[in-house]
Image: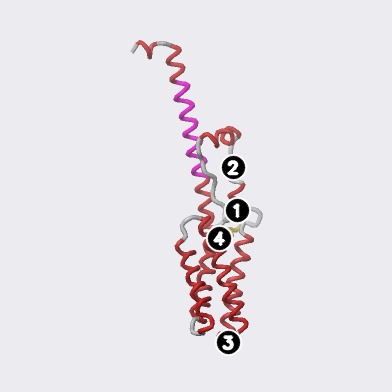
Amino acid sequence: MTLLKNRKTAILITAIVAILATLLGVRGSLNRLARDVEAMFVSGVYLEDEKFTQPGIYAHLENRAASALALATALESYPELKAETENLLTARRGLMNANTIKDRYAANESLQQAFTALEEKAGKLSLSGRDKETLEMHASDFSGARTAIMDSRYNAAAASYLDGVSILARILRPFVFVKPPQAFA
């Protein structure tokens, strides 16, 4: 008890508690901020200058997955396209099973390659009129979703998540082990 009655010890303990509380507070705030930015992947990014919320990349990935499924289903009856439709369905499953933003990016790239391979090979075949229209429609939807993903401001939000924080938080960030939000890249 005499140790706690010593003024120097009391000041040291108070300083340690204040530093720890500051570090924990900064860590909690920055983690919350990173989670809020990553939530924009699903919910969308609010565009202040345009006064609306841009749809999240996740919604566009769902549209791409739906287009891939519909096209593979429509063209799977062609024996010449069997391997390509199976590859597309496998890539789609990979996208649907991806858990992190980075995994979804990699799965989306695989889906793009599989879709392009099927589209190119199907374009060389003599498809029925209905199947040709189906190919064009789903290729357009798939491409439109890709364009929307490329136009998304999510990655800019992820890169600039520290823009509104204090200098103290910027300085302490490396010491409190905060992971920045994942970019879709």
Specify the principal SS of the magenta part.
Answer: helix
Look at the image and give the residue range highlighted in magenta: 14-33
Picture coordinates of residue 103, whole percent (x, y): 51, 57
- Judged from the image, the secondary structure of the residue bearing numbered disc 4 is helix
Real-space Cα separation, disc 3 to disc 2, in angstroms: 52 Å
Mark 3 packing: few (<14 Cα in 10 Å), some, or many (20+)? some
Give the label, 1 or 3, closer to the camera: 3
Q: In this view, does 66 lie to the left or right of 46?
A: left
Cα separation, mark 4 vs mark 1, equals 10 Å
The outermost residue toward the right is: 49
Kindly state the secondary structure of the residue where label 1 is placed.
helix
Query: Residue 168: horizontal and vertical position, in percent?
Result: 58, 32
The disc, 2 or 4, on the residue closer to the chain's N-terminal end is 4
Mark sitting on residue 57: 4
Looking at the figure, which quarter contains the C terminus? bottom right
Name the front one of labels 3 and 4: 3
Residue 111 % position (x, y): 54, 67
Amino acid, disc 1: Asn
Q: What residue type is labelled 4?
A: Ile
Q: Which residue is drawn at 55% across and 36% down?
A: 174
Q: Which residue is disc 2 drawn over?
A: 162
Q: Is residue 175 above or below residue 5?
A: below
| Label whose residue precedes the other's in the sequence (4 or 1) | 4
Residue assigned mark 3: 127
Dot 1 corresponds to which residue? Answer: 155
Marks 2/1: CA–CA distance: 13 Å
Residue at image coords 61%, 70%: 143
Query: In which quadrant is the N terminus drawn?
Result: top left
Image location of residue 139, percent across then percent down: 59, 75
